[in-house]
Image (cartoon, grey):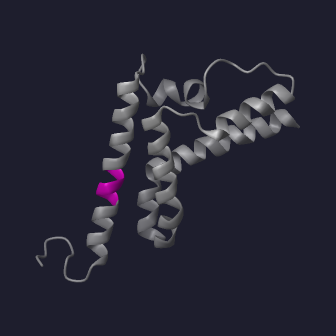
Amino acid sequence: MYGLLADLTVVLHGGFVLFVVLGGVLVWKWPWLAWVHLPAVVWAIGIEWVGGICPLTDLEHWLRVASGVAVSEGDFVDRFVLWWLYPEGLTRTHQLALGGALLLGNLAVYGHWLRQRRPGLRAGERA
C-alpha cells in the first residue's frame, strides 16, 4: 500500500510541476483557477530560489521507506524530471535562472490575459 501511495505522490508531484509551468494558460479558460495557480507559482519559484526541497519529495521518500523500498539518491526532480527538463550539471545559478524564467513566463501569460480582459485594450487597440 505504501508503494502505491509513493507512486501516486510522484504522479501528483509531476502534475503540480506541469500545472505550475502551464497553468497560466488554463486561467484564460477558467479565470478562477488563478487563485490556485498563482500561489503554486510563488511556491515553485521560492523552492527554486532558496534551493529547497518540496514536501512532496519528503512524503514520497517516507512512503518508499515505509514500503521497504530503498530510496534512490536525489529528489523528485533528480529522478523523474532532470533528464528532460534540466541540463546535466545543474548548478545553483541554473536554479535561479529557472525560477526567473518561470516568473517572467507567468508574468507574460498573465499580462497578456489581463490585457485581453480589459475593455478597449484588446490586441492592436490603444488606450
Say which quadrant the N terminus sits in. top right
Name the residue: 33% across, 41% down. Answer: 100
- 49 vs 104, nearest the viewer: 49
| Residue 114 placement, left or right of 9 | left
**Residue 107 covered by magenta stretch:** yes
Going by the picture, which residue comes out furthest to the left?
126
Decide: is 4 above or below 19: above
Name the residue: 47% across, 56% down. Answer: 23
Residue 37 image point, x, y percent:
50, 59
Q: How many marks?
A: 0
| Residue 74 placement, left or right of 89 | right
| Residue 91 placement, left or right of 59 | left
**Residue 120 covered by magenta stretch:** no
Quadrant position of residue 58: top right
Going by the picture, which residue comes out furthest to the front?
50
Say which quadrant the C terminus sits in. bottom left
| Residue 62 placement, left or right of 111 | right
Q: Is the magenta stretch mostly helix, strand or loop?
A: helix
Magenta highlight range: 105-109
Residue 39 image point, x, y percent:
50, 57
Quadrant position of residue 62: top right
Name the residue: 47% across, 65% down. Answer: 34
- 88 vs 42, nearest the viewer: 42
Residue 96 image point, x, y percent:
37, 33
Decide: is 20 above or below 52: below
Decide: is 68 above or below 10: above
Name the residue: 36% across, 53% down. Answer: 106
Residue 118 image point, x, y percent:
27, 79
Quadrant position of residue 54: top right
